[in-house]
Image (tube, coloured by chain):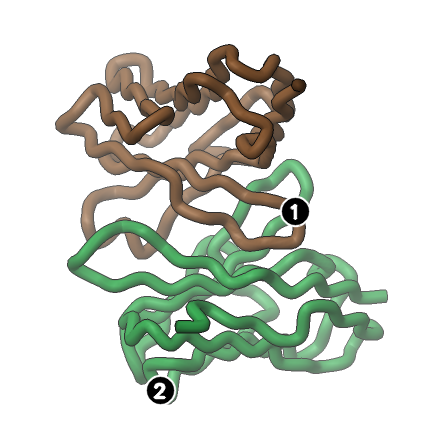
Amino acid sequence: NAGVTQTPKFQVLKTGQSMTLQCAQDMNHEYMSWYRQDPGMGLRLIHYSVGAGITDQGEVPNGYNVSRSTTEDFPLRLLSAAPSQTSVYFCASMLLASSYEQYFGPGTRLTVT
Amino acid sequence: DQQVKQNSPSLSVQEGRISILNCDYTNSMFDYFLWYKKYPAEGPTFLISISSIKDKNEDGRFTVFLNKSAKHLSLHIVPSQPGDSAVYFCAASEGIQGAQKLVFGQGTRLTINP
């Protein structure tokens, strides 16, 4: 099993550009989520999904869109990047009704200039 | 408003000694708590958890203590090893459904000195 994979590892965007951060898992987990990590802030939940076709907002959803068309994939879209979205982004997955343990990907470091 | 707080940004401990990492929370609805460990350039990995029906949970060198009245939990690592050097995050949730919406603390960077 590859676990949770994220692409790209690094990305630099100009203000106003759009992009999609990719996340995939091969563990057949129903739950997937996106977090951002900023210095002194810990990890903050952006969006999450409990299954294909179901998404919900987390603590900091503004400026981000998600969709879940398959169990395996959960892409995060930035429609118009802003410098405030400079951060490290982590995707995670979890088997619902089994444990509370979320499995995290290696992260994507995004810089918006 | 930070609902989960780790007030020590960093901690330095000698190899072989005990490391104690602390975490405070303000939301009395939190009833499940987790610790994650993070190495540089990697995602966090689950370490240990505790439910509010317990006040202690042990897994090898790692023990988590929960004091519900003080809204405080701590992670003890005994004995500390160089490989324990990492950033540790505590996280909290409200029940089973709440596990879908973890709230993390800011993290504590632990350095184990030889």
- Mark 1 lies on a secondary structure that is loop
Q: Residue at x 66, y 18 (%)?
A: B114
Amino acid bearing label 2: Thr
Q: Residue at x 53, y 47 (%)?
A: A43
* Residue A42 in view, yes or no: yes
* Residue A57 in view, yes or no: no
Q: Which chain is green?
A: A
Contact (Cβ within 8 Å) of mark 2 with mark 1:
no
- Residue A50 lies left or right of residue A37; in this view the side is left
Query: How far apart are the alpha carbons under marks 2 and 1?
Result: 30 Å
Disc 1: which chain?
Answer: B
Amino acid bearing label 1: Pro
- Residue B100, horizontal then vertical, whole percent: 31, 56
Closer to the eye: label 2 or 1 = 1
As displayed, is residue A46 above or below residue B27?
A: below
- Residue B111, horizontal then vertical, whole percent: 64, 25
Q: For the residue carrying disc 2, how many other residues have a C-alpha within 10 Å: few (<14), some (14-19), or many (20+)?
A: few
Q: Which residue is mark 1?
A: B40
Residue A26: which quarter of the image?
bottom left
- Mark 2 lies on a secondary structure that is loop
Q: Which residue is mark 2?
A: A70
Q: Colour of chain B?
A: brown
